[in-house]
Amino acid sequence: MQQITLSKRINELLVLAVLDHGPAHGYQIALSVEERTGGAFSFQHGTLYPILHRLEAEGRLQSEWHGERRRRKTYHLTAAGRAELAAGAEELERQFQALFGLIRGTHVA
Amino acid sequence: MSREHPLKRVERGLKVPPRRRLDLIEEVDADVRALQAELERRGRTPGQARRAALRQAVPDDRALADLEARHAPPLGRWAGATGWIDRAVVLGVALAATLAGFIAVIAMYGSGVPLVPAFVIWPLAVVIAALAANLSWAVIQLLVHGDLRPRQRRLLWTRQAGLVVAAVALGALGAAWVGRVTLAPLEPQMWAEPMWEPPVLEAVARMATVAGTGLAAAVFGLFGWLALTPRLLTDEEAERRIARFFAQARPHLALASDPSVDNEHRGES
């Protein structure tokens, strides 16, 4: 996997986690992230779209256009995305445990 | 207050193929409308909801750069990563022009037409170099950015048409000059002997070679034109749809004049 920053990784996992509950439009993903994290995370200034398009290009999401005159795009998770979410969440949990272990002086095995 | 559609800046700033630009602005527009409706349903005024929706969904410069990096053609992504994107265009154009001009001069001096004056050879070489530069500029733009804007496209066709006409004109001028120099001394002989005598035929062949060089340059320009046309026609259709999108959009609240937008620019994920 290409090396990406922690914040990018978290953003990706936020998107994957929301879509794990079902297909959604871009705005629904952004709203859902904000609401379900109590405002701790939010996507502003269109930062959501590069993430969605990257995940789609990597095969973790798929999108479909609906409508004729006014088109709308819906994203849904693929099997690869679901696997990525599980692996990513586990990896992130380990990293944060290690981080807080260091901060709080607790030894993590 | 600016009446420009907020997505116009996105469309203008995003250097990706027109089809990608159209998809993005339609996607963002649909999200802005839906988000605005949702926020109004939750009790915000239309103005507040509109501004919040625009702030959330309309890509800023950083998001645009990310999108550009994602949707640029492979060569563009590579050139962008190495920081050679502008130099790639300049170098490519310079290389193509130099090579074409050099080949044209060698071909013309080596064609056994010693009577062609320098005032025809060198301008013709410059025209051929300019044709190559014009075409390579368009091709490299398409390879690097995947995008040739309508204004750039019009410029490409105008320059190409002008250069093709110049090539034909220079070829004709050169042929006329060669004819004047080679056929004038033969004029008494031409009336006395049949037209197909070797000196006359040789003069005509020289004229045809010079005219042919101009025509060959014009054909080169026309072939380049034809090679690019299918791709540009496809892009043209997407450009028309983009123009239609903005023409049909009703006036929107502008982002630029809203100070709250910049104040809330920090702290997002």
Image: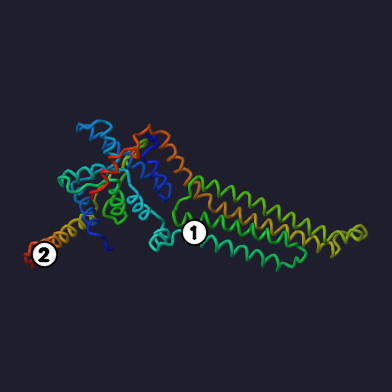
In the image, residue B27 lies at what x, y percent? 33, 42
Element type at marker 2?
helix
Side (left or right) of B214 relative to B238: right
Residue at 36% x, 43% y: name it: B25
Q: Residue furthest right?
A: B192
Side (left or right) of A2 relative to A93: right
In the image, residue B180 lies at what x, y percent? 82, 57
Mark 2 Cα within 10 Å, few/some/many (few <14, many 20+)? few
In the image, residue B87 lies at what x, y percent? 47, 61
Chain of residue at mark 2:
A
Q: CA distance from mark 2 to mark 1?
A: 50 Å
The type of residue carrying mark 2 is: Leu
Does residue A49 lie above or below B77 as drawn?
above
Q: Which mark is residue B89?
A: 1
Side (left or right) of B251 relative to B263: right
Q: Which mark is residue A28?
A: none
Residue at 73% x, 62% y: name it: B118
The type of residue carrying mark 1 is: Val
Does residue B223 lie above or below B28 as drawn?
below
